[in-house]
Image (cartoon, grey):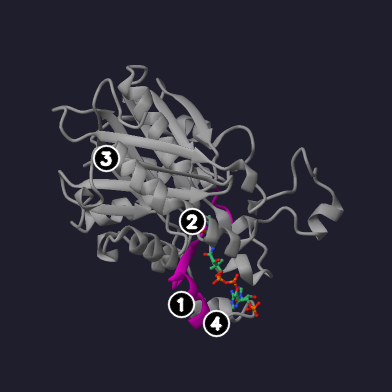
Amino acid sequence: MTIFKGRPVSLLGSGIYVPEKVLTNYDLEKMVDTSDEWIRTRTGIVERRVAAEDQVTSDLAYLAAVEALKSASMSPEEIDMVIVATNTPDTIFPSVAAKVQGRLEAINAGASDIQSGCTSSVYALSFAAAGIASSIWDKVLVIGAEVLTKLLNWEDRATCVLFGDGAGAMVLGVSPDGKNKVISTSLKSDGTKSDLIILPGGLVECPASVEMIQKRLHTIHMKGSEVFKFVNKVLPLFLEQFCEESNLSLNDITWWIFHQANYRIIESVLRRLDVPVERAILNIDKYGNTSAASVFLAFHEALVDGKVKKGDKVIFVSFGSGMTYGATLMEI
Ligand code: UT7
């Protein structure tokens, strides 16, 4: 089933945080054999943010959460659950969510991380909405936060030019008027492609060792062009079916908020759907691929810029390691 039943769930507030340090394509030209022209034309990325040496994912997540709570005019005690979508947790345990919940003094909230590749964002939004619709929780803080730059091999031009750091948060709760609400969601996975985006070292399968570090297995590895092909093949049909199951035509959607992995992916998926690219919110040029944070960053900036308005139908679409993919449709 795709359409939400139960209590209507609304967006009550949102916020973001990005680190101050900017790393441009020109900076990268001095670090690896690449060029601004290659990065710009192949991905749409111009610059990305890099966390400070002493900043970890929970720091970014906390700062985005404070902004989201402020915009929802809500105090931390009102939150029932903190969910953090991340692939770069400070540690495997405790969770980032528990640290954020503690720091916020959200004394009535539970806390858990979701780790489903870049699609963690859409998974987290869906779980939060499902929990509220079914009356388990009233108010949920959903955060997407990543510090990817500390897990990159800065000698591998195929990955180090792509990723950046950032965090975005949303507060979801019961819709006051029942109108502006989360409409539908669909979460998918093709685990036969689990080798396409990996961080293989440092845990159970490949424990920490000198050899593991020498082979750089503690950093992100990606078969980029295979990911590119997979997404282009799977997403158009998936999105067509999702809109149909949501009882909406593709043209009913006001804004398309894709995971900002590559401008060319967004453009070609929309072309296959016959939707003008002007309907997409894009900020990959400023932040690169921020994985589970990307749709939150894109949405919040578009809201603040006045592009996304109350009543707009917005679709969040993501894809990533797993290979997972999914979409959530919301009337703002
Ligand atoms: O967030 C999770 C989901 N991830 C994604 O969606 C990523 C999906 N994949 C992509 O976005 C693209 O595949 C990439 C941007 C990663 C790569 O673009 P591509 O057009 O698929 O390039 P490619 O991997 O086929 O490489 C083309 C050429 C190769 O050289 P040769 O073999 O043609 O001589 C690469 O070695 O580009 C070379 N190359 C680079 N050149 C300059 C690869 N990385 C770089 C680089 N600078 N940074």
Disc 4 residue: CB within 8 Å of ligand 1? yes
Count of numbered circles on the image: 4
Instruction: Please name the residue shown 57% across and 76% down the image.
Output: 28
Kindly identify which residue carries mark 3. Answer: 330
- Which mark, residue 233? 2
- Which mark, residue 35? 4
> Disc 2 or 3, which lies upstream in sequence?
2
Ligand 1 image position (quadrant): bottom right
| In this rendering, position of residue 194 left or right of residue 244 | right
Q: Amino acid at mark 2?
A: Lys
Instruction: Please name the residue shown 30% across and 28% down the image.
Output: 4
Q: Do callouts 1 and 3 mark residues in contact (Cβ within 8 Å)?
A: no
Q: Nearer the viewer, mark 3 or mark 4?
A: 3
Q: CA distance from mark 1 to mark 4?
A: 10 Å
Q: Amino acid at mark 1?
A: Thr
- The image shows residue 248 at horizontal and vertical percentages of 23, 42
